[in-house]
Image: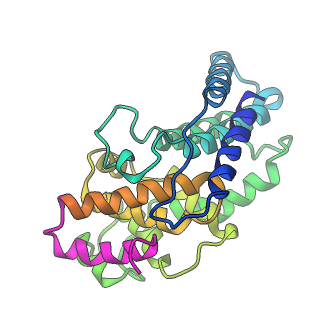
Amino acid sequence: MHIVQTLTISHDRYLDSQSHPSSPLKKTYPPRTLPEVHHLSVGASLFNRKLSFPVNPSVDGDALWSAAALLGVTAMCMLDATIPAEAWPLKPSEPSDLEWLKLSEMKMVIWDITDPTRPDSIFSAQAKEMQERFGSRYAGKERGIEGILGEFIELFGLGEETDEGNNPYYGMVRQLVPRLNEECTREQFLSYLSMLSHMAPAFKQLLRLKDPRALLLMGFWYGKVGDTVWWIERRARLEGQAICIYLKKFHGDDMRLMGLLDWLRRMIGMVG
């Protein structure tokens, strides 16, 4: 219940930001409130306490999976920044950077523990459908450059024998780039969200190091999903803009990168 209350307050903050029309570049968001932080703290504490004991999936599985999913949503929409300058990667580095992304890994652990595909789960049909639709897509066995635009092939050093094992960018490029010219509808949103749970550890480490090519891909991901659901808009808008500013400021001499950055800036509304 505390996690639900957290999301309710977060949604109220979002609605408040929508009541003050402004351009995408000047849009600001109210900061987190004390009740929001309180309910999240209590909810996360109760969740962790439950996980400290043996889990019986038939008894606790659905509640734990629901809590894990809602915590993932909460982490995505909870952001202290109100303008791009305060957002990652522009702000000074902190140990808490990309904590929301780590929760994607946590969700997969909870998935394994609770097994939402089991017959007695209320999520059984939906979970099986997700596995069928997205599971094989991220098996990590793909290789090659079919469907990938030439600019990305050159920037990321891809070839016919490239796969996730020999190129840390490949998984994200393979799943994201062929779809950049397609609209991301709410029906397609789950496939983009699944990319987070299947990011290669080496790619996540590059993000933590603020590697420019990894940041560019993350920016394109933000650009695709930013207008789909309310709880992702704030992070996608602020961190997407922060990525563009960061890359221009610190890597403006990389002409191949700058060419694709212009595309990203148009995607998220930073240029006309």
Quadrant where the C terminus sits is: bottom left
Q: Position of residue 111 (x, y in %)?
A: 65, 40
Q: Which residues are magenta?
A: 250-272
Q: Quadrant of residue 42 in the image?
A: top right
Q: Position of residue 104 (x, y in %)?
A: 54, 44
The reply, left or right, for residue 110 in relation to residue 64 is left
User: Which residue extends farthest left?
Assistant: 253
Counting the numbered discs, the total is 0
Q: Nearer the viewer, residue 180 or 87?
A: 87
Residue 157 colored in magenta in the image: no
Q: Quadrant of residue 267 in the image?
A: bottom left
Q: Nearer the viewer, residue 46 or 62?
A: 46
Q: Residue at x 68, y 26 (%)?
A: 39
Visible in this render: residue 257? yes
Q: Nearer the viewer, residue 111 or 63?
A: 63
Q: Nearer the viewer, residue 260 or 174?
A: 260
Q: Residue at x 74, y 60 (%)?
A: 129
Q: Residue at x 51, y 60 (%)?
A: 138
Residue 266 colored in magenta in the image: yes
Answer above or below: position of 50 versus 116. Answer: above
